[in-house]
Image (tube, coloured by chain):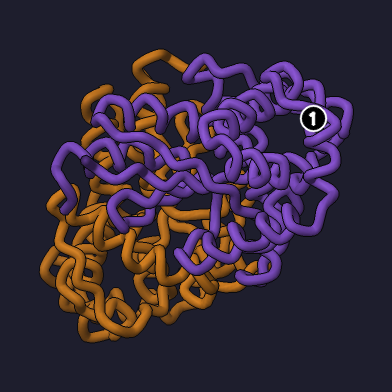
Chain colours: A orange, B purple
Amino acid sequence: MAKPIEFYFDFISPFGYIGAHLMEEVAAQHGRTLDWRPMLLGVAVMNVMGLKPLPDTPLKGPYVRHDSRRFARMFDLPMNPPEEQMAPLPAARAFAWLKDRDDALAVRFAKAAMQAYWGEGRSMDRPDELVAVAESLGIDGGELTAAIASEPVKQRLRDWVELSLDKGVFGTPSFIVDGELFWGADRVWMIDRWLERGGW
Amino acid sequence: MAKPIEFYFDFISPFGYIGAHLMEEVAAQHGRTLDWRPMLLGVAVMNVMGLKPLPDTPLKGPYVRHDSRRFARMFDLPMNPPEEQMAPLPAARAFAWLKDRDDALAVRFAKAAMQAYWGEGRSMDRPDELVAVAESLGIDGGELTAAIASEPVKQRLRDWVELSLDKGVFGTPSFIVDGELFWGADRVWMIDRWLERGGW
């Protein structure tokens, strides 16, 4: 059986949200599944690459804000994020915690949290909003709150971030297909071709 | 008649070379022409955006080198650049000079210079190689050499770079389609859709 496609994402990125949506379709068409894995864009961009955050980058920041709306609209995805950028840690820790317990549930949580933030403008770094999303999926809000404040869960996310960097992942969404890294929601068409041709 | 698609490029980028190739096809399918315009990635990235050059960026540098070869291969474009990165000024100045005299010839020159550098590994900052490419198109090598050393031609390129920044262009290739900016060879499929749908 074909290996799952590794999908590295950070909740903080509109392109992760768009990319997840597009890639799920393409993966399904090729009989592939996605293995959702958290990464942290801030760690990759600032600590490892030594760059400033994208929203603070002249020219590119304004372009990306406009482009993410245009891109989502093209695929009929709602795109109404809150004014303020989200702190990605609470949601990423919640995902890491859930992934160890129930991978399918973790994916459902990730989709619901992305939908809540990017589609509905709900702040996913606010504990009450995060708990509300989790509870809508039958996850215990109290357990979630305790988990994301716990050292083992923090460490678990650090391990995931470390793994993503080891694999050369620097952006979100990133996909690893049979060992080959692809970066960007705008590369899903290329992965489609890649899978179609069986590589090069 | 529909306006030409503005195409901003820097000879220094493999994606400019790939993007020109892909976009020419898509533009033709929609009965559109391309208006080739020089920009300088170094000025946009380092001076305006305050970032380091892409090849020197950890994670992203190695990815881009691999990706440009894979991308070109997917479209049967030769990709064999020289080891050393090219200094883009001589070719860009030559293009700016030619564009004022004969726009079609300037485009043929740009394509030939990209093909020579990216496809055949010929250093386009070496005067003899640049002159050889120009002469193969019937351009006077002596005139070209004098032109690219002249202050008015240097200023002409500065004006083009200024214009590109005024338009929000920060990368190569960039395309402006009826006022809408798209960045990246990996967005040509999106411009295709955009033209198909007549905008949003």
Crowding at dot 1, Cα within 10 Å, few <14 / some 14-19 / many 20+, comes out as many
Name the quadrant containing residue A101: bottom left
Q: In the picture shown, does residue B78 fall above or below B1?
A: above
Q: In the picture shown, does residue A35 fall above or below A139?
A: above
Name the residue nearer the viewer: A118 or B132. B132
Q: Quadrant of the N terminus of chain B?
A: top left
Residue type at numbered disc 1: Leu
Look at 22% across and 25% down and name the residue there: A29
Q: Chain of mark 1?
A: B
Residue labelled with disc 1: B130
Q: In the picture shown, does residue B80 fall above or below A146?
A: above
Look at 54% across and 72% down and name the residue there: A57
Query: What is the secondary structure assignment of the residue under circle 1?
Result: helix
Name the quadrant containing residue B105: top right
Left or right for B122, reference B155: right
Name the residue nearer the viewer: B85 or B52. B85
**Rendering coords of residue A84 (x, y %):** 33, 84
**Rendering coords of residue A121 (x, y %):** 20, 76
